[in-house]
Structure formats: C-alpha cells, structure tokens
Image: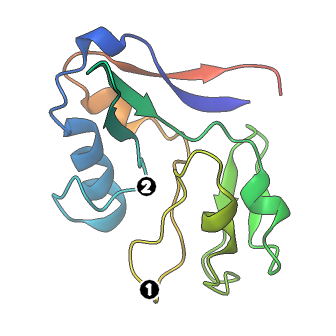
C-alpha cells in the first residue's frame, strides 16, 4: 500500500508549500486552502505541530453508494468524479477528516499519494511509504 507519511515533524515550518503545490497541480490555483493533500496542520494542547494524512483505510469506499471510490493497484483509494453523486457520505465517515468537499457542487477530494507535496517540501518533512496492506 502506498501512502503519504511524515518523516520529520520537527522540521516542519508550517509554510504550507506542500499544500500550495498540491493546489497548483490539481486545481491550477496557488492556494494552500484548496488542495487534495488536506494535511491538516493542527496545534495540539501542548503546542506541538501535527500533520494528519489519508491512511487509505477505505471507509470512504465502503460508504459510497455510487461505487465511485475504488482502490488502485498501489492500494490508494481514488475518486471517480464522474460517477460521484456528491452526497458527502464519504466525507462524513472519514475517521481522520481528510476527505473534504471544497465546494458544495463538487465531488470530494482526498490525497492520492502522488508525491507532489513531497517534492515541494523545502524541509523534507513528507515522504511516500509503501507498506503491505
């Protein structure tokens, strides 16, 4: 299974370069707030930075009535935006809150472990890991 992982959280500067690169690649916008990465930069109670990413658990696919979310050979769940009914059930069941609806009339988005963010990160915080499913 291929998935995005954090290699060194302490090196993260919270610069949002990863999210901006993702937005540019998928949405042709230079905005860290519209992207598939949805790595949420969260400050915990002790002030530590935390990055949450899609772990490819498949709950979104199991709850998709349109069968628009399928797993590819690399173990990554992909959304077929043409089959998607835009009901939002996949967003509701995502345990990590990394499946998002960017617009009410659009199909949801999620990380597809493509590696664009990994290449863009100036601090080498992110990596793509391959592990057994």
- Residue 26, image quadrant: bottom left
Left or right of residue 53: residue 20: left
Image position of 39 with respect to 60: above or below: above
Left or right of residue 69: residue 87: left
Query: Tag 1, which secondary structure?
Result: loop
Image position of 64 with respect to 116: above or below: below
- Residue 33, image quadrant: bottom left
Image position of 80 with respect to 110: above or below: below
The x and y percentages for residue 131 are: 73, 19
Please report the residue visible at 47 percent of the width from the left and 71 percent of the height from the top. 101
Left or right of residue 61: residue 37: left
Tell me the tag on residue 36: 2
Alpha-carbon distance for marks 2 and 1? Answer: 16 Å
Tell me the tag on residue 64: none
Please report the residue visible at 83 percent of the width from the left and 79 percent of the height from the top. 65
The x and y percentages for residue 30 are: 15, 58
Residue corresponding to mark 1: 104
């Amino acid at each position: 299974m291929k998935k995005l992982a954090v290699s060194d959280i302490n090196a993260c500067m919270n610069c949002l370069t990863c999210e901006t690169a993702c937005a540019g690649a998928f949405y042709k916008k230079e905005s860290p707030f519209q992207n598939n990465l949805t790595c949420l930069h969260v400050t915990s109670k002790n002030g530590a930075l935390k990055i949450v990413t899609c772990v490819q658990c498949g709950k979104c696919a199991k709850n998709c009535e349109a069968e628009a979310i399928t797993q590819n050979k690399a173990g990554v769940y992909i959304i077929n935006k043409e089959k998607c009914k835009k009901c939002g059930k996949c967003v509701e069941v995502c345990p990590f809150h990394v499946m998002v609806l960017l617009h009410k009339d659009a199909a949801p988005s999620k990380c597809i472990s493509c590696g664009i963010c990994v290449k863009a990160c100036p601090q080498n915080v992110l990596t793509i890991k391959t592990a057994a499913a």
